[in-house]
Amino acid sequence: MDRPRQFDKSPESEIWNAIDAFEQILKAIPDDRTALETLFDAYDQIGDKPKSLEYLVMLVQVIIEEGDTDSVPWTYDSLIRIGEGNAITNQAIKELENLMLNMGLPSPSELSNPGTSSIQGVDVSSELSMAWTLRQSDQLTEDEYSLIVKDLTENSTKHVEVPVSVQHVLYDRNFSNLEKVLAFMSTDSGIPFVHLSMFEFDRSKFSTLSAEFGVRKGAMVFEQLGKEYLVAILNPNNQELRDEVEKSIGHPCHFYLTSAQDYDSYLLRSRQAATAAEMY
């Protein structure tokens, strides 16, 4: 697959920018785990299986050296999914099995669910692109950018009840310039900012998209005007998500950027409403 010759703001071009950055990190630190995880996931997202497998096998070696048994199931599943049973894949699988055996733990096949690796449960490619945009625009320092990528990669492998997003990472880390970043996101994308706390929760409107969609995708309906829907999102640069939302709803949508805090509060109100409904 040829790399884009020009750097535009499309998600794939930004992924290539991130790939370039992390490949430079690996030249200096060959076993940097964050770089390996990010490169595996990035190449996997753009469909380059050979490169994705190359970095996954390197990552497996680091996981074995660290004795990180918690990461064995998803790496095992990923090897099965993209490795196609070649010799390199089989060797990596054998080494993972030996790690678990030496630790007195169940084999990877007993712990995993082949074909549905946890790292694939949440697609963070658009969030990696958002982080790269913020770094390139000097909204983040190099250290802040590295921490965000690390958190995104790790959170993508966990069971979460809120979206995995750049915003959530910044909020969780008490990022001091969060309001400035939100203002940049809105201005750069041309998508207006909205305070969801100013809107009453309406279960019928919220349910236009499933609650699971709201958690996994980072988009929720908060208002309806006739046959047009107002949708809150966390990543204004994710055009693919906006297209998916409009296709799912089947009506025109107007998108608004909101904060992670407001988004999570709205999700909480939806859960409380669902619980109350079940009681009656």
Image (spheres, rainbow, N blue to C red):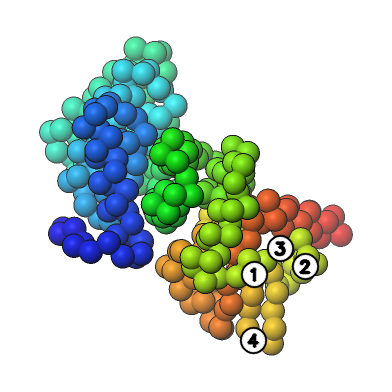
Q: Earlier in the sequence, mark 4 or mark 2?
A: 2
Position of 148 relative to 61 (above/below): below
- The amino acid pointed to by label 2 is Phe
Residue count near mark 1 (Cα–Cα under 10 Å), binned few <14, some 14–19, many ≥20? many
User: Residue under circle 4?
Assistant: 227
The label nearer to you, 3 versus 2, is 3
Residue at mark 3 to residue at mark 2: CA–CA distance = 8 Å
Q: Where residue 221 sits: x, y (%)?
A: 64, 69
Residue at mark 4 to residue at mark 2: CA–CA distance = 19 Å
Q: Quadrant of residue 40?
A: top left
User: Residue under circle 3?
Assistant: 195
Q: Earlier in the sequence, mark 3 or mark 1?
A: 3
Q: Which mark is on residue 36? A: none
Q: Please indicate whether residue 4 sits to the left or right of residue 134 in the image.
A: left
- The amino acid pointed to by label 4 is Lys
- Tags 4 and 2 touching, CB below 8 Å: no
- The amino acid pointed to by label 3 is His
- The amino acid pointed to by label 1 is Val
User: Residue under circle 2?
Assistant: 199
Residue at mark 3 to residue at mark 4: CA–CA distance = 22 Å
User: Residue under circle 1?
Assistant: 221
Q: Please indicate whether residue 65 sits to the left or right of residue 185 in the image.
A: left
Q: Earlier in the sequence, mark 3 or mark 4?
A: 3
Report the front residue among 172 and 145: 145
User: Which SS class for mark 2?
Assistant: loop
Q: Where's the C terminus, which quadrant?
A: bottom right
Report the front residue among 203 and 262: 262
